[in-house]
């Protein structure tokens, strides 16, 4: 739910994003992926949802960015994932065996076999290939590899559903990101909408060829969106509005958090079409925007990077941007990482952005040459990384953190004082902002505090002897 005053509800249906207006009671389809094409807007693939923890593909811009236009309409924006599973292998799901679907006998009322020693100790007996004539090894063959069984084969007839799921070593789903702009009036509701894809040279596959997944996404805080009073008047699409994405490679050994200004997105496309599947439109995004780029100097900023060559990177839900103490040249955020010592701990990161900064020379090809007219497309911010917690105990990665910016406190769960219990804690980052930071420089792109995190006072808010859970919600 989002838009001005929370008026709209956006959801994915039939592969497209639909917006429901709670005032006019009307539904409007705002994206146009072809039916049964393997492309879906606002959707999340199974691997992303189950393995990597991102469950949403639709993100409303902050309501403070809603703006009025000269045509007496109000504009709102949605960041939307465009999921392309056309190259992903489909896994055939067989119909349940008679013991589950057709057998109504048994003391449990039917539909499922009774739990017994035989079903528990030898569950494979219920699904053996030769028991019901199945060949589960050939269940991979529709829309993405292998050979589909003929219609006369009994085992093919028993495959009742197909699920897109990449097997190890095969192609995964591809995700692009678009901005959907919605113009609406008080009584008539939505009167116009358009889809804005990224310009070709800003596509993630070109700038970050190592990226396989976008595991987290959202909008930069309003105060960071060039932190000026003109933001609310200028609204979405104006200079300064931006989104953020967290990237991850397939081996889960490299991640990056990037900031993408809305100037990196092409002008809106009206009408019932998919701009990324229309060849005539796609070609215009490659070369038709030189005047915009040369005037605005739009570039993607790398706010944070991490590599773990000897271990995979565990994901979490701890990333929080700090709007109150961020500016257009210094973006601050809280994140949890296992970057040192093998334990997950909280860090205060400041990404210092220089608009005149030259493109990094360490980016992998072809990102090293991703520039147009001598202006870089990617800039690496100087990262100041300050530890908030430390020790031989982990901040839990399955619970989000809550940041009280007014009092500069971070609330989090941790397995402390022993790994069998979870307690709620709070730590302050006020001393990092109110005093001069003592730092040592470890390269042109990174500074790490020399002050140990042990000096940070941590308050335990729950009692020992029990394990605790906490939930974070927006009271608005």
Image: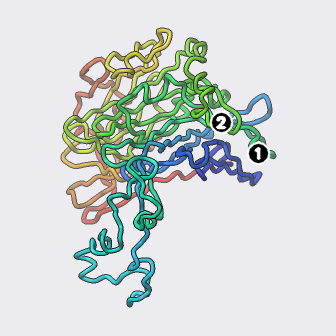
**Is 289 displayed left or right of 152 in the figure?**
right
**Is 410 displayed left or right of 30 in the figure?**
left
Quickly name the residue at label 2: 181
Percent coordinates x, y for residue 135 in the rendering: 34, 64
Task: Judge whether 476 appears above or below 207 on screen.
Answer: below
Farthest top residue in view: 374
Depth check: give the residue in front, 124 or 173: 124
**Is 303 displayed left or right of 290 in the figure?**
left
Disc 1 from disc 2: Cα separation:
14 Å
Farthest front residue in view: 152
Q: Sequence-wise, which precedes: disc 1 or disc 2? A: 2
Q: Which quarter of the figure has residue 209?
A: top left
Q: Is residue 227 visible?
A: no
Q: Which quarter of the figure has residue 116?
A: bottom left
The residue located at (27%, 71%) in the rendering is 124
Task: Judge whether 209 appears above or below 361 on screen.
Answer: below
Percent coordinates x, y for residue 193 in the rendering: 70, 37
Percent coordinates x, y for residue 393 in the rendering: 22, 49
Marks 1 and 2 in Cβ contact (< 8 Å): no
The residue located at (27%, 74%) in the rendering is 125
Quickly name the residue at label 1: 189
The residue located at (34%, 45%) in the rendering is 315
How many badges with numbers are in the image? 2
Disc 2 packing (10 Å; few <14; some 14–19; many ≥20): many
Q: Secondary structure at mark 2?
A: strand
Depth check: give the residue in front, 116 or 256: 116
Q: Secondary structure at mark 1?
A: strand
**Is 86 displayed left or right of 136 in the figure?**
right
């Amino acid at each position: 739910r989002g838009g001005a005053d929370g008026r709209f509800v956006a959801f994915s249906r039939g592969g497209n994003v639909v917006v429901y207006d709670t005032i006019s009671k009307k539904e409007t389809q705002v994206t146009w992926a072809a039916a049964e094409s393997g492309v879906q807007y606002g959707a999340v693939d199974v691997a992303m949802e189950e393995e990597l923890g991102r469950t949403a593909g639709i993100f409303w811009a902050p309501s403070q960015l809603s703006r009025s236009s000269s045509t007496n309409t109000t504009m709102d924006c949605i960041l939307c994932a465009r999921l392309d599973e056309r190259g992903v292998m489909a896994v055939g799901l067989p119909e349940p065996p008679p013991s589950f679907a057709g057998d109504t006998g048994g003391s449990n009322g039917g539909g499922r076999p009774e739990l017994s020693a035989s079903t528990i100790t030898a569950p494979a007996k219920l699904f053996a290939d030769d028991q019901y004539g199945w060949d589960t090894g050939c269940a991979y063959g529709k829309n993405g590899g292998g050979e589909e069984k003929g219609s006369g084969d009994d085992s093919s007839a028993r495959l009742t559903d197909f699920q897109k799921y990449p097997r190890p070593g095969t192609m995964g789903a591809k995700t692009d990101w678009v901005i959907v702009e919605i113009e609406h009036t008080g009584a008539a509701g939505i009167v116009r909408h358009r889809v804005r894809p990224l310009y070709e040279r800003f596509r993630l596959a070109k700038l970050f060829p190592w990226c396989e997944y976008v595991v987290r996404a959202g909008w930069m805080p309003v105060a960071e969106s060039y932190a000026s009073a003109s933001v609310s008047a200028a609204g979405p699409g104006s200079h300064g509005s931006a989104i953020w994405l967290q990237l991850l490679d397939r081996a889960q050994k490299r991640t990056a958090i990037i900031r993408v200004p809305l100037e990196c997105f092409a002008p809106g496309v009206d009408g019932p079409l998919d701009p990324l599947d229309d060849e005539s439109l796609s070609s215009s995004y490659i070369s038709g925007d030189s005047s915009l780029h040369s005037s605005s100097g739009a570039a993607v900023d790398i706010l944070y990077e991490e590599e773990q060559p000897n271990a995979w990177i565990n994901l979490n839900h701890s990333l929080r941007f700090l709007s109150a103490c961020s500016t257009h040249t210094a973006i601050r955020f809280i994140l949890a990482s296992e970057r040192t010592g093998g334990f997950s701990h909280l860090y205060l990161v400041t990404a210092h952005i220089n608009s005149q900064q030259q493109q990094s020379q360490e980016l992998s090809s072809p990102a090293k040459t991703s520039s147009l007219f001598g202006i870089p497309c990617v800039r690496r911010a100087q990262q100041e990384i300050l530890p908030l917690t430390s020790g031989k105990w982990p901040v839990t990665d399955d619970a989000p953190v809550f940041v009280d910016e007014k009092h500069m406190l971070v609330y989090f769960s941790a397995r402390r004082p022993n790994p069998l219990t979870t307690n709620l804690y709070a730590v302050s980052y006020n001393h990092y902002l109110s005093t001069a930071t003592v730092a040592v420089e470890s390269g042109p792109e990174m500074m790490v505090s020399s002050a140990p995190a042990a000096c940070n006072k941590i308050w335990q808010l729950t009692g020992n002897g029990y394990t605790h859970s906490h939930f974070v919600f927006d009271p608005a």
